[in-house]
Image (spheres, helix red, strand yellow):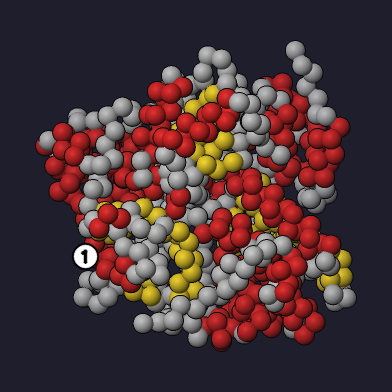
Amino acid sequence: MKEIKFSEATMVKVREIISRYPDGRHKSALIPVLHLAQAEFDGWLSPEVMQYIAEILAIQAIEVFEVASFYSMFNLQPRGKCLIEVCRTSSCWLNGAYNIISYLEEKLNIKVGETTRDGKYTLKAVECLGSCGTAPMLQIGDQYHENLTFEKVDELLENYQQGEKMSNYC
Amino acid sequence: MKEGKKILFEHIDVPGIEGIATYRSCGGYQSVDKALTSMTATEVVHDVITSGLRGRGGAGFQTGTKWNFLAKPEGVPRYLVCNADESEPGTFKDRYLMEKIPHLLIEGMIVSSYALGVNKAYIYIRGEYFYLYKILEQAIEEAYKAGWLGQNILNSQYNLDLYMHIGAGAYICGEETALLESLEGKRGNPRIKPPFPAVAGLYGCPTVVNNVETIAAVPYIVQHGGEHYASFGTEKSTGTKLISASGHINKPGVYEIELGLPVEEFIYSDSYCGGIRNGNELKAVVAGGSSVPILPKHLILQTPDGQPRLMSYESLSEGGFAAGTMLGSGGFIVMDETTSIVMNLHTFARFYHHESCGQCSPCREGTGWMEKILHKILDGHGTLSDIDLLWDIQSKIEGKTICALGDAAAWPVASAIRHFRPEFEAYIKDPSAIKKFSHYNEKYKIAETAI
């Protein structure tokens, strides 16, 4: 098992983030640091990772879990390398988000919430991502893919198949 | 017809405006120069009061009044926090502004911080907007290098540090006290008010929380004076507003409008939405983000007494909740005749169920039940009494929770039943009726709740 320890470069970022908050308020750095942790440790927050973050920020592990379990962007289970999040709230729905979701389900042969057997893709349906004027849309990593059509979805998956960086946070 | 005044978007199409050099050459950062070298903090606050600027995040509270409430105890730091947690369905204006012209927000943060006597300010941005976080980080770095941020700005003895802070996916963090909790590294559970943030906000210190668009309007107000700003718009809705237009229109996008523009012109004019797609009939509009009451065509275009409905705080709310709505965040969702109001409502109900923080039982339980009942109706198992049950549940959430999310979850349900009850009845009597709507998708299992 890989050792749970931030790289030196990430630690520099962690220290810089902590310095943004007043003395004694380092707990404020928790959410940004959890993003870093997720990016560095396979896209999810295991109990061991949360314990490690607690130690870095000198807080209790339960305080980390409280936060990690509240915010929808933190994954408490392993997920596929490429996390596809399709928006399905009003404006996206009005413009055919459900069709995009069904299309992806068929194409990847999984249901919403599942991961492909090869561990490559996880499909999620999410709530409003603030892209209502360019609906329907989906997000992969920090990239927004907007005005989707079935052809665009094909193209996207094709690109990711060919090993385009499965972008992540921070 | 009114000339559309552009205040925030005047230079938005200038190539390179996202960089500090071009931004400067278009007059950027002049308000900082003016405020720090020739105005007292009180004078800046006074200008914002006379401008009549109202909070652009949704509630529409007078910004100057909010600033005036800020407690100023000796020796206690004060904070300004910009709410960039834009997540109201139908709203994407702040995203557009921050992407296109990030320095406008930074300039606004500097003058506003100066006015409020703040030396440390934060921009709290939603986690999904990570690409914008990077854009803003870069803009902040440019501003530091150019001497607009840091120690002794323009030799005025004024110091300001501005930092980005990223969220991680929670609609509730757009509520200002939840946002502050989140900024302190906790779950985004709204606080009981009072005390208001103006007295005890971030780290228990006096704090002002303002929306991106509100802050971005301040440089213009400082530069040209509050009275000049108030000369645009209407008496109670001064200035301009960014409207995020989406749904079944020909030209979705973000438009800066002078408040008081007729709704009909906004929907049908080629300068704005450009009419309904495919030449279809307008059916309904959600005018201010998912939380505000939905209105059918005849009520969105005209007030109950037959006057043209205008895009302003007061005109949209005319008729109360029986026949009116709210300007809210300006998330303008247009639905044509092919839209199932019940299915749309289901997407809203699911959204609020997913986003309820779980602190107050009426909201935690009620939002879940509303989603379940709507699902039951859409699945063909509804009974007529379910409509009354939905009404009953929403009425037991509204006004009975710590924060406004409960109201925001209740209003769409109440208004959909109020204005479109026959459509609910039609599905219940004949479940196959749902299939005639363009969005019906047999394959998609709407049973999937949020994951």
Give the camera-side residue of B176 and B328: B328
Q: Residues within 10 Å of mark 1 (few under 14, many from 20)?
A: some
Q: Is residue B359 visible?
A: no
For badge 1, the amino acid type reads His
Parent chain of label 1 = B
Where residue B24 sits: x, y (%)?
73, 72
For mark 1, give the secondary structure: helix
- Residue at image point 25% right, 45% down: B340
- Quarter occupied by the N terminus of chain B: bottom left
Residue occupied by mark 1: B298
In screen coordinates, is A108 left or right of B183? left
In screen coordinates, is A30 left or right of B149? left
Where residue B336 sits: x, y (%)?
26, 53
The single residue placed furthest to the left in the displayed view is B429
Image quadrant of residue B8? bottom right
- Residue at image point 52% right, 20% down: A115
Where residue A158 sits: x, y (%)?
54, 28
- Residue at image point 35% right, 58% down: B250
Depicted B170 relative to depicted B330: above or below = above
Where residue B275 sits: x, y (%)?
31, 63
Q: Is residue A9 visible?
A: yes
